[in-house]
Image: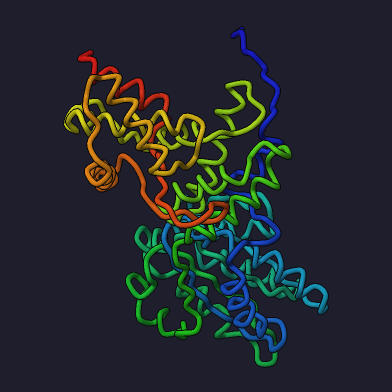
Amino acid sequence: MAGFEERPQRIISDFGKLDFDFVPEKLVHRDGPMQQLFSLMRSSVEKSLNQRAAITGSVGTGKSSIAKRFCMDFQEWASKKGHRVEFAIVNCRSRNTSSGAMLKILDRFQPNFPDRGFSTSEMLEILRKHLAKGSVHLIVVLDEVNMLIKKSGPDLLYCLSRFDDERVAGTRHSISLILISQQPVNEFLDPATLSTLKRTNLITLDKYAEKELRDILAQRVELAFHPGTVEDDIVEFIASVSSEFGDARFAIELLENAGRAANEDGLDSVGPEHVRAAKALTYPVVTEDKLRALGEQKQLVLLAVSRTMRKKAFATTGEAEKAYAVACEEFGQKPRGHTQFWEYMRALADIGFIGLGMSGKGMVGKTSIITLPDIPARVLEEKLLDVMNGK
């Protein structure tokens, strides 16, 4: 048996709250789309109508979370009004055939439904009987619906969108649809299905801004980490690093991996080096060849930055310039003037070694600040010294 070392979890208290499938009770910065969905779907309960909505947006914008959170909240809202609403969420990437999608939907009413022996049309009729028997309005969420259509064509989607066309007069509509995709739906839906979607039924999610990512991360820290293990400046740093992509999933993954790294180091809190290490695992952008190509003066500037940032998420250019003068003395070089130093900083930012921005919350006055998002400062310093010493 392997000799595993069971280290106590000092940093993360609940890994489940960092899982991609976890949906918080409150979705930060997604009130607008949630309200838009409610405005669309409430008529399925109040007026016995069916509805169709489409949610589009890039990876990590909250499409799946919005749909799941909405369905849970809407089910509770309908129950208080005396109506039964159920929902079935189908991942069309893993269930990209009509029969596979229908099996997932039927599982909501008849677990362990046999996966052989029934055609799609037969399964639709069985579903119809379940809905009629329980007076149920079903919301079907087809996540990554474009994958289903690419693999199996639009037939199932058409059948679901027309599910109630032949209902007996006076009976309730029984199915509403929420379609999720990264692509705009007009790029893959057939005209017949597309015609059932009004313009107001299309919800487009933008990438998260840095401030929004900061609020999302702060929520996850509160839910998943031991108190005092992640300070505000670390949340700010991760939000800054993640803002390039606007992807909440990436931001939460960085947070988790930084927490794991801190725990592996036996520490009681997450530091900026743990965040950089987490990012470097995903995007290793700094190589010795790139460092060699910088030339001596830029190498000295970057060495100064790495030393300044050993225990910081952010540093000022003034701090880096002082460290640059020390590094120049160490290597027998004359430090360049402030204007030239600033040009070196701009060049390093342009090629992605550092980030440059203006000071914000918690800093007095306006000054330029430096970030080092892609590699731990300690590792960068070691690599630079190897290159500069000819190793």
- Residue at image x 78%, y 77%? 83
Is 125 left, or right, of 238 in this rendering?
right
Direction from residue 341 to residue 293 in the image, left or right: left
Quadrant containing the N terminus is: top right
Image quadrant for the C terminus?
top left
How has the structure been colored for display? rainbow
Question: As rendered, which of 28 and 108 lies closer to the eye?
Answer: 28
Residue 100: x %, y % from top left: 50, 55
Residue 331: x and y in percent read 25, 19
Residue 122 higher or lower than 337, as above or below: below
The image quarter in which residue 342 lies = top left
Q: Residue at x 71, y 59 (%)?
A: 25
Q: 100 above or below 341?
A: below
**Position in image of residue 42 (x %, y %):** 67, 81
Residue 96 appears anywhere in the view: no
Question: Residue at point 32% right, 30% down?
Answer: 325
Position of residue 212 measured from the top left corner of the image (x, y, whole percent): 54, 60
Instruction: Tell me if I can see residue 22 in this picture.
Output: yes
Side (left or right) of 190 relative to 260: left
Q: Is residue 43 left or right of residue 181?
A: right
